[in-house]
Amino acid sequence: MHLAHPLGMKGIADRRVKNDERDAADLADLLRMGRLPEAWIAPPQVRALRESVRHRAKLVALRSGLQAQAHAVLARQGATLAPSDMLGAAGRRQLDELRPDPPFQARVLSYSG
């Protein structure tokens, strides 16, 4: 079994006569001549690694968004923290020292977890 790369198969899509029989014949001819553009199928280990990387990237983006929201809430209250300090020990101490209005404090605490 061969997996043809879709970008390499654009020539077939531009034909006037398009049907399964004609496509199969053209694909067989390309394969016989060694000119069939094949796609690479990643092995299971690579696919698992890619899934882990995608999941981590989504978690990092989510964390960054929550930090940005917490900074926006604090800015409305006139308080600022260094962006990198929000989740660290120093940032936690600063958050404890800040006393924003109760609704804002609840939001900041929910963002900082």
Image (tube, grey):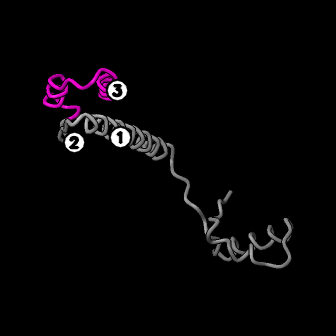
Q: Residue at image x 67%, y 77%?
A: 33
Q: Are marks 2 and 3 in contact (CB under 8 Å)?
A: no
Q: Is 72 a magenta residue?
A: no
What residue would you read off at disc 3?
Answer: 107
Q: Quadrant of residue 53?
A: top left
Q: Nearer the viewer, residue 58 or 10?
A: 58
User: What is the distance, in whole Å, between disc 2 and disc 3 at their CAs?
Assistant: 17 Å
> From which residue to which does the magenta span run?
86-113
**Residue at which label 2 appears:** 83
As helix, strand or loop, the secondary structure at mark 2 comes to helix
Earlier residue among tags 2 and 1:
1
Q: In the picture provided, is 56 more to the left or to the right than 80?
A: right
Q: Which mark is residue 60?
A: 1
**Image quadrant in which the C terminus is located:** top left
Q: Nearer the viewer, mark 3 or mark 1?
A: 3
Q: Is mark 3 on a helix, strand or loop?
A: helix
Q: Single out the mark in the foreground, 2 or 1.
A: 2
How far apart in space, not on screen, are marks 3 and 1 (Cα)? Answer: 20 Å
Residue 46 location in percent, x, y?
45, 47
Residue 82 drawn at (x, y percent): 17, 41
Mark 1, Cα crowd under 10 Å, few <14 / some 14-19 / many 20+, is: few
Within-10-Å neighbours for mark 2: few <14, some 14–19, many 20+: few
- Closer mark to the observer between disc 2 and disc 3: 3
Q: How many labels does the image show?
A: 3
Is 92 positioned to the left or the right of 49 in the image?
left
Q: Which of marks 2 and 3 is nearer the N terminus?
A: 2
Residue lying at 62% horizontally and 65% vertically, measured from the top left: 5
Pointer 3 or 1: first along the chain: 1
Query: Where 77 sits versus 15, above or below?
Result: above
